[in-house]
Image: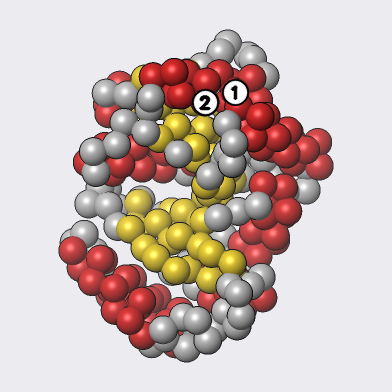
């Protein structure tokens, strides 16, 4: 499984990768990380620290081409029979066309390295972003065909309410959730899928019951999160 992680600057991509690797390890998966952020200072070192904490290897290059790093990581993962390869990418604004083209190149190179890769294209969103989430999702979806979202920083006053607008206006709807019993910056991973019909009609009561149960299991019972879930569920017709 090849996962490509994207997002704007400072959304929490590298930290989310570290926590995601920790979660997948507990599910018995073998992990390989790729330091595809060759632009930001100390980005490789940050991912290497997460690799050290989780006991997983990191593929990196000093100032190399991000697409080359991604290709090498997938090749190494196949050779080592690794279960999951997670590829970090540099933060970028969706208005930076040349950087969005770089993401498209990485995606093309991954497809050459392994059929069907990347199998997951995840966008990390800062929960404080608000309605600008819509512009980010549309731009990154156009570049890498998103399959999921990771929403971070929900431990503050932000409630990630723009997710309801995403389901309504973009036609992408959360279909599952995974909660990690890790620090508060990581609250939930909201997986997305393209709705074959009406996004609102496909979001049922049973799913939201499952989401709330997962949150409770992860020890996340704060009133802010519960209220956010209720409002989003109501907006999606599933409360």
Quickly name the residue at label 1: 71
Give me the residue at 37% from left, 27% from top.
Answer: 82
Residue at the spot x=72%, y=47% of the render? 143
- Asked if residue 64 shows in the view, the reply is yes
- Name the secondary structure under disc 2: helix
Above/below status of 1 relative to 135? above
Which residue is rendered at x = 50% and y = 73% of the image? 161
Secondary element at image label 1: helix
Q: Is residue 37 above or below residue 10?
A: above
Left or right, residue 74 beside residue 225:
right
Q: Quadrant of the N terminus?
A: top left
Q: Is residue 199 above or below residue 6?
A: below
Going by the image, does 238 lie left or right of 171? Answer: left
* Residue 227 showing in the rendered view: no
Q: Are marks 1 and 2 in contact (CB under 8 Å)?
A: yes
Q: CA distance from mark 1 to mark 2?
A: 5 Å
Residue 30 position in % (x across, y down) = 31, 31
Q: Position of residue 178 (x, y in %)?
A: 33, 58
Q: Residues within 10 Å of mark 1 (few under 14, many from 20)?
A: many
Q: Is residue 10 above or below residue 61?
A: below
Where residue 235 appears, as percent x and y from the top left, is 50, 85
- Residue lying at the far top of the rendered structure: 62
In the picture, the quarter occupied by the C terminus is: bottom left
Along the viewing direction, whichever of 188 and 3 lies nearer the viewer? 3
In which quadrant of the rendered view does residue 205 lie?
bottom left
The quarter of the displayed image where residue 25 is located? top left
Q: Residue 221: percent from the left, percent from the top?
A: 22, 69
Count numbered badges in the picture: 2
The residue labelled by disc 2 is: 74
Q: Nearer the viewer, residue 171 or 153?
A: 171
């Amino acid at each position: 499984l090849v996962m490509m992680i994207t997002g704007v600057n400072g959304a929490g991509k590298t930290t989310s990768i570290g926590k995601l690797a920790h979660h997948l390890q507990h599910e018995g998966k073998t992990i390989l990380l790729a330091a595809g952020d060759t632009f930001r200072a100390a980005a490789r070192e940050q991912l290497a620290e997460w690799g050290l904490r989780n006991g997983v290897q990191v593929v990196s290059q000093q100032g190399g081409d991000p697409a080359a790093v991604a290709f090498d990581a997938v090749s190494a993962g196949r050779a080592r029979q690794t279960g999951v390869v997670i590829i970090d990418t540099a933060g970028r604004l969706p208005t930076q066309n040349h950087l969005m083209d770089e993401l498209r190149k990485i995606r093309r190179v991954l497809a050459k390295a392994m059929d069907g890769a990347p199998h997951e294209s995840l966008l990390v969103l800062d929960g404080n972003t608000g309605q600008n989430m819509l512009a980010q999702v549309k731009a990154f979806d156009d570049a890498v065909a998103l399959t999921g979202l990771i929403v971070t920083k929900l431990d503050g006053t932000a409630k990630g309410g723009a997710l309801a607008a995403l389901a309504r206006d973009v036609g992408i709807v959360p279909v599952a959730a995974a909660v990690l019993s890790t620090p508060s910056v990581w609250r939930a991973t909201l997986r997305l899928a393209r709705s074959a019909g009406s996004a609102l009609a496909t979001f049922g009561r049973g799913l939201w019951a499952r989401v709330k149960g997962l949150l409770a299991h992860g020890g996340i019972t704060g009133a802010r999160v519960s209220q956010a879930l209720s409002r989003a569920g109501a907006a999606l017709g599933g409360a």
